Image (cartoon, rainbow, N blue to C red):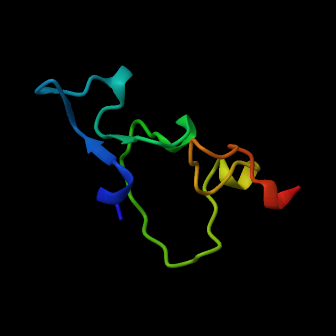
Amino acid sequence: LILDNDIIMAHKMNEIALPPERGFPFALVAEEKWGYKWIKWITKIELSDDVNYRGYWESRGYANTGDLDKSFLDQSRR
């Protein structure tokens, strides 16, 4: 799934450890996704099998998929 969605988790940029302003210790780049799906300063990853789970932005009305070709607002919640 990660490879299919062009998602990259990085700890270096141009062979240099990420500085704090770029997201140290880890940053996640999600090509083809709205910016709220890109993450800096990752220190913990929590897995869930709850299909109804909504993250910080999603629980505030943003779409769960974050696809660039769709509205970033969750149309089903209107």
Q: Quadrant of residue 22?
A: top left
| Residue lying at 75% horizontally and 53% vertically, measured from the top left | 74
Left or right of 45 on screen, residue 9: left
Q: Classify the position of the C terminus by image quarter.
A: bottom right
Left or right of 39 on screen, residue 9: left
Q: Position of residue 62 (x, y in %)?
A: 70, 48
- Between 69 and 25, which is closer to the camera in this rendering? 69
Residue most extreme to the left: 15
Q: Position of residue 63 (x, y in %)?
A: 67, 52
- Between 11 and 43, which is closer to the camera in this rendering? 11
Q: How many marks?
A: 0
- Between 67 and 17, which is closer to the camera in this rendering? 67
33 shown above or below 24? below
51 shown above or below 30? below
Q: Position of residue 9 (x, y in %)?
A: 29, 45
Q: Classify the position of the N terminus by image quarter.
A: bottom left
Left or right of 77 on screen, residue 48: left
47 shown above or below 58? below
| Residue lying at 43% horizontally and 69% vertically, measured from the top left | 47
Residue most extreme to the front: 69
Residue most extreme to the right: 78
26 shown above or below 63? above
| Residue lying at 56% horizontally and 48% vertically, measured from the top left | 67
- Between 31 and 41, which is closer to the camera in this rendering? 31
Q: Position of residue 41 (x, y in %)?
A: 39, 37
| Residue lying at 41% horizontally and 41% vertically, measured from the top left | 31
